[in-house]
Amino acid sequence: MDQNLVYEVLSHYDLPAPLAGFVPYGYGHINDTFCVLTQPREGDCIRFILQRMNPKVFPDTNALMENMVGVTTFLRKHVVQQGGNPDREAMQILFTKENTSFYTDEEGNGWRLMPFIEGTVCLQAAETPALFEASGKAFGRFQRMLGSYPAETLKETIPGFHDTEKRFERFMTVLNADPMGRAKEVQSEINFLLARQKDCSVALEAHRQGILPLRVTHNDTKLNNVLLDRNTLEGICVIDLDTVMPGLSMNDFGDSIRFGANHCAEDEKDLSKVNFDLSLFEVFTRGFLEGAAGTLTEAEIRYLPWGARLMTLECGMRFLTDYLEGDVYFRTTYPGQNLDRCRTQFKLVADMESVFAKMEAICAAHA
Ligand code: ADP
Ligand code: GN1
Ligand code: MG
């Protein structure tokens, strides 16, 4: 990354103090994120999060940022009404000197700037059950807060984002083309997925039959997309709002379980370390339902275990597709990382299948 480009971007913002520097930040797979430091003459430095949005993933930056400004403004008002602190409990998009919600550089890439929410931690793995429960509560609450958001004003930033059937079709197209000649190396992963084609329709079919309603959902509820209070370890603020769109509640629940209800990294190579943890599933369920506070229907709660299975299967399928395509979507730091990621997801799916009745019993008990 050309440092001068970042300076050029920042020159379009009214910063509160002289710029002290910036460093790459976080473990996101999509955006380029930087922590920007400004240093007043006296006192602590004031930090910001600067992101270059990924135009391959989000081709319509205007639509993306319209959603983002709409949702953050709505959430900030909601937090104020509830007597909370909007600067801690909601994100904020800072506007440029030209009064736009993002800056477009000479290459056409969009950049956005946000205050850094201080006094928080962002975890890559659930270190304790209590932390995972806190994240569940935050994501459940997030969904409840957006219950009254005018869904019709939201743009679909990634059409069919959790359309698992469409994702499967896309996988088949890439598999048939096999552009990198990699299919022969991954036959067992391919077979695992082919054997589960029917599963890809479970949620969509329930929605088509009117069993599951559309809600405004986050759609990317990884543990590292929620900030926890550094001292109380409570969930403070849900971040990474790029994919807030109409969706199914079970998917928000499921994506958190996929990422957090285990004790390994998403790209762990040693599959003996990759195990679905039913006790973490239970604490998350408790937190999520407490946070959602009665907004979910009986059917939505009944389908939560499927949300976990399907989000994990879908994510594994997306990693596998990307591996077959030559790693063009998810950022990778070493060759084969998407295949490692796919393998962890499929191992977790298999684990979930073997304890599925227990997952259902847990959801029923917490309904
Ligand atoms: P990506 O879509 O690439 O995952 P995110 O929006 O999740 O990008 O940002 C990446 C990381 O940056 C987060 O996991 C978190 O650690 C950090 N981060 C993002 N926004 C903020 C914020 N407002 N305050 C503090 N940390 C943040
Ligand atoms: C991406 O942006 P990030 O890193 O939070 C991806 C999710 C995947 C996740 C897998 C917009 O999330 O859908 O589940 O990686 N986000 C997008 O770790 O595709
Ligand atoms: Mg993220």
Image: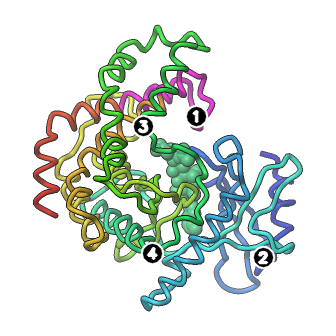
Secondary structure of the residue carrying numbered label 1: loop
Tell me the residue at 49%/75% (across/down).
Answer: 119
Residue on which the image places disc 4:
148
Task: Judge: label 3 CB < 8 Å from ligand 2.
Answer: no
Q: Which secondary structure lies at badge 2?
A: loop
Q: Earlier in the sequence, mark 1 or mark 4?
A: 4
Q: Position of residue 258 (x, y in %)?
A: 34, 45
Q: What is the CA distance from the residue labelled 2 to the residue labelled 3?
A: 43 Å
Q: Nearer the viewer, residue 160 or 8?
A: 160
Q: Earlier in the sequence, mark 2 or mark 1?
A: 2
Mark 3, other Cα within 10 Å: few <14 / some 14–19 / many ≥20 = many
Q: Nearer the viewer, mark 2 or mark 4?
A: 4
Residue under label 1? 333
On the rendered structure, is 290 left or right of 60? left
| Residue 238 at x, y percent in the picture | 47, 66
Q: Mark 1 belongs to which amino acid? A: Thr
